Image: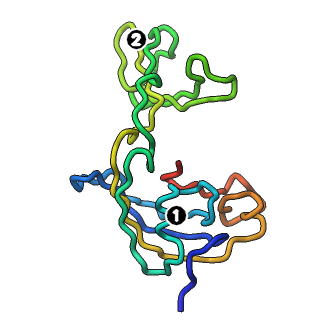
Amino acid sequence: MSAQVHKNTVVTLDYNVTDPEGELLDAGEEALVYLHGGYDDIFPRVEEALHEKRVGDTVTLKLQPDNAFGEYDASLVQVEPRANFPSGIEVGMQFEGAPEGAEEDDFVLYRVTEITDDTVVLDGNHPLAGAALIFTCTVTAVRPASTEEIAHGHVHGVDEDDDEDDVDAPVRH
């Protein structure tokens, strides 16, 4: 009998994400590996649905924006003077910054979504903010988490003493 998903297990998933019409948004080309048990490594609704599943079990969930990447927040869109950016700037590049009025260490990752001769449009929303998602996954492996993984609250890579090899789930919230 295969191991069961429960608190303090490391779970490996094959997954994909589509929109409600079936358009593929994330093919899940790399396995998703997370520490199960409320460590915020994966969306809570997905973690809840996977609890007590076994290797080979498949789960499909429809996630509303509140349970995925949140509602789209127009206040996270900023238009900045083009002169404030390097000459090689391109749509899709990302910059870290604080929204107006935010705390000093409250940074957001902004994507460049539009460039004109005079302006650069930055969007701090996740690209899937405001979207309903269909998340389908199959449990491919379950193992007990190491003491270090539990203490750190996330999965470690091959060299567990090197935090630079940590695995981050691609759909981390």
Relative image position of residue 49 (x, y in whole percent): 46, 68
SS state under label 1: helix
The spot of residue 1 in percent (x, y) is: 53, 92
Picture disc at residue 61: none
Is 106 or 143 nearer to us in this picture? 106
Q: Which image quadrant for residue 161?
A: bottom right
Q: Which residue is mark 1?
A: 47
Circle 2 sits on which residue? 119
Residue in view at x 44 percent, y 38 percent: 126
69 over 117 or under it: above or below? below
Earlier along the polypeptide chain: callout 1 or callout 2?
Answer: 1
**Lateral position of residue 131 relative to residue 38, left or right:** left
CB of mark 1 within 8 Å of CB of mark 2? no
Type of amino acid at the residue the image marks with label 2: Thr
Q: Nearer the viewer, mark 1 or mark 2?
A: 1
For the point 46% across and 21% down, the residue is: 88
Please name the amino acid that badge 1 sits on.
Glu
In the displayed structure, 82 sits above or below 5; it is above
